[in-house]
Image (spheres, rainbow, N blue to C red):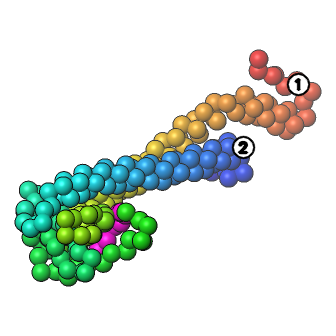
Amino acid sequence: MSTALHPRSLRFRLTALATLVVAVVVAITAVVLLAVQRQQLTATLDASLEQRAETIGSQLTDQLPYQPLPTNDEDRAFQVVGDDGSIVAVSRNLSGAAALPDSLRPDQRQQVSTRRDLPIEDDSYRVLTRRIDLPSGRAVLHVAENSDDLSEAIANLTVALALTLPAVVALLAGLMWWVTGRTLRPVETIRAEVDAISATHSSQRVHVPT
């Protein structure tokens, strides 16, 4: 085994320490990147729900005629539940389903949550629940949109980072090995001269690089 590759060698220890620091920084950066990406995608989806809630709420009338959503029924849905628990209006894909539970506090106007209990598909949905005023009284509007695309985007990014970052760390480790080798070369030269002098019991002086 080469002296430089020995775990106790200065070059090996410096490279290992620097690689560890880089690996920790890269891992933290990846976690932060995933969190920021999830937050941004979730904020975009929530903004879309807000806009659709405003549109649906403004279109409701006393008769509340059903207006099919101009999108894929499996991806979007809405339901309006009156104060008495009756369903006042609903999208086609929730027709016949029971009223969605309302977890709003008395002082809370709306909330957004991720749910899997919608009777549409076994998928994850982002659901905005909002209190609204109708000509016939108070009601609760639920607006839902499939969030599986969001989860899939985060999963794909996670896989990409898991495959890419180890290669980046390995590349940086190789670069640091080379840099530490060049940096420590004068030290190794001096040590080799000292060993040679000690072995021959010579009085020759050690040459110090300038």
Residue indicated by mark 2: 10
Magenta segment boundaries in residue numbering? 110-116
Query: Could you tell me if the residues under marks 1 and 2 are in contact, i.e. CB atoms within 8 Å?
Result: no
- SS at mark 2? helix
**Which residue is nearer to you in this view: 160 or 98?**
98
Q: Quadrant of the C terminus?
A: top right
Label 2 amino acid? Leu
**Going from the N terminus, do you reach mark 1 or mark 2 first?**
2
Residue at image position (90%, 30%) is 202
Sort mark 1 into few (<14), some (14-19) or many (20+) by Cα contacts within 10 Å: few
As for residue 112 lying within the magenta part, the answer is yes
| Place of residue 38 in the rendered image (x, y in percent of width and height, measured from the top left) | 38, 54
Residue indicated by mark 1: 204
Tag of residue 8? none
Q: Is residue 24 left or right of residue 131?
A: right
- SS at mark 1? loop
| Place of residue 131 in the rendered image (x, y in percent of width and height, measured from the top left) | 31, 65
Query: Looking at the image, is 46 positioned above or below residue 91?
Result: above
Residue at image position (40%, 52%) is 39
Hey, which quadrant is residue 60 in on the image?
Answer: bottom left
| Place of residue 98 in the rendered image (x, y in percent of width and height, measured from the top left) | 20, 82
Residue at image position (75%, 32%) is 187
Hey, which quadrant is residue 135 in on the image?
Answer: bottom left
As for residue 198 lying within the magenta part, the answer is no
Sort mark 2 into few (<14), some (14-19) or many (20+) by Cα contacts within 10 Å: some
Query: Which of the two discs, 1 and 2, sits closer to the camera?
Result: 2
Q: Is residue 107 left or right of residue 91?
A: right
Q: Is residue 137 left or right of residue 206?
A: left
Q: CA distance from mark 1 to mark 2?
A: 26 Å
| Place of residue 53 in the rendered image (x, y in percent of width and height, measured from the top left) | 24, 57
Query: Looking at the image, is 125 positioned above or below residue 56?
Result: below
